Amino acid sequence: MKLSSPRIQLLFAAMLPALPVQATPEENFVNPLVQGQFQAAEIFSESGFEDKVIGKLESVTLDGKSLLKLISEATEVDFPRGARLLVDLGGFKGANKFAPMSGTTAGAVFVVDRDGNVLVNASAYMLFEFDFNALIYSGLVDFLNDKEKTKNQFPATLRLLFPHRDIDILFRGNCFENFRMSEPNDEGIQRVRGVTRFQGSGNGFFDDERFIGTVHCVLRGNELVED
């Protein structure tokens, strides 16, 4: 969010004192970790006059490499070594039909190579929603100099959807972000940095069996923007 003049900045700050100038860099590399269990089996047996049911669970761990493999299977695209997941907030859009909350912002997910070139759009398989409308923060927002140093918290969701593996899991939780934005230099360029940790719990299906688990994602952004 850019404000055109100091007078407008101060007026805007007076009207909306709890709104940060900007939260979260537009492009963030994401390192996800999903852990949980799914119902592997229910074994029915007879013992004397009593029927017994024995349930068995199987543990699941999905990291960035595992998710890249699932995306590769779904898209039939082989990714080179060094491929990474990137969440792009540059094109803000309203909540789509998958969003469990209204007023959220969808983050497009891409697989990129080590040089940042887009290999495939993976938004159909990893659906991030960030509710910036519910953001709370502590720290400094300097409207006069257009800089910020804040700690932000806001709700978010992540849906993993891989039909070819019968995976459909929805995680709900909160993001905890350390955000920094320098004031513009003589050329109007600002450095924007952010580290966001998304922690959530969720349930759904894995291999078409009921799943319950948690997710922990670290999103890192570091970019130069023009004022």
Image: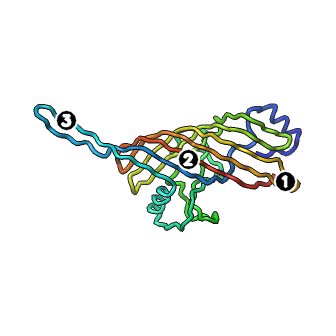
Position of residue 98 measured from the top left corner of the image (x, y, whole percent) = 51, 45
Nearest the eye: 56 or 161? 56
Q: As drawn, is 70 to the left or to the right of 4?
A: left
* Mark carried by residue 107: none
Marks 3,1: beta carbons within 8 A: no
Position of residue 47 measured from the top left corner of the image (x, y, whole percent) = 13, 36
Residue at 64% x, 35% y is 134
C-alpha separation, residue under disc 2 versus residue under disc 1: 32 Å
- Tell which circle, 3 or 2, labels the residue nearer the N-terminal end: 3
Question: According to the image, label 2 marks what residue?
Answer: 217
Q: As drawn, is 139 to the left or to the right of 52?
A: right
Question: Label 3's element?
Answer: strand
Task: Bin the neighbour count of mark 2 within 10 Å (Cα to Cα): few under 14, some 14-19, many 20 and up.
Answer: some
**Residue type at the position of mark 3:** Lys
Question: Label 2's element?
Answer: strand
Nearest the eye: 4 or 17? 17
Q: Where does the N terminus fall, quadrant-wise?
A: top right
Q: Quadrant of residue 74?
A: bottom left
C-alpha separation, residue under disc 3 versus residue under disc 2: 40 Å
Question: According to the image, label 3 marks what residue?
Answer: 52
View extreme (left): residue: 48
C-alpha separation, residue under disc 3 versus residue under disc 1: 72 Å
- Tell which circle, 3 or 1, labels the residue nearer the N-terminal end: 3
* Mark carried by residue 188: 1
**Residue type at the position of mark 1:** Gly
Residue at 82% x, 39% y is 142
- For the residues carrying marks 2 and 1, which lies nearer the camera in this image? 2
